[in-house]
Amino acid sequence: MEAWKAELRGVRRSYNRRLENPLPLPTRTLPERFAHTWSLVEKGERPA
């Protein structure tokens, strides 16, 4: 998974930028994730 998508998917990264193990279940439904991501796009926040 690309690093910038981790937060959008509700996945936390450890201090060394690796994914936590085991991966947690999603914290948002698909429609909620889409709405959140779209709000970021509208604010001009894009992946680096």
Image: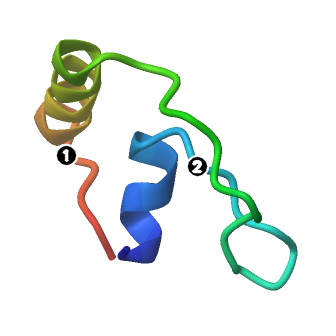
Q: Residue 21 at what x, y percent from top left?
A: 76, 65
Tell me the SS state at disc 1: loop
For the point 28% across and 67% down, the residue is 47
45, above or below 10, in the image: below
Q: Residue furthest right?
A: 15
Q: Residue 3 at what x, y percent from top left?
A: 46, 73
**What separation in Å lies between label 1 and label 2 (alpha carbons)?**
22 Å
Give the mark nearest the N terminus, 1 or 2: 2
Q: Amino acid at mark 1?
A: Gly
Q: Nearer the viewer, residue 23 or 46?
A: 23
Query: Mark 1 = which residue?
Result: 44
For the point 64% across and 54% down, the residue is 23
Q: Residue 2 at what x, y percent from top left?
A: 36, 76
Query: Mark 2 = which residue?
Result: 11
Tell me the SS state at disc 2: loop
Q: Residue furthest front?
A: 22
Other-residue count near label 2 (Cα within 10 Å), few / some / many at <14 / 14–19 / ≥20: some
Q: Residue 35 at what x, y percent from top left?
A: 18, 18
Quadrant hosting residue 5: bottom left
Q: Quadrant of the C terminus?
A: bottom left
Q: Nearer the viewer, residue 10 or 41?
A: 10
For the point 82% across and 69% down, the residue is 14
43, above or below 21, in the image: above
For the point 24% across and 58% down, the residue is 46
Q: Amino acid at mark 2?
A: Val
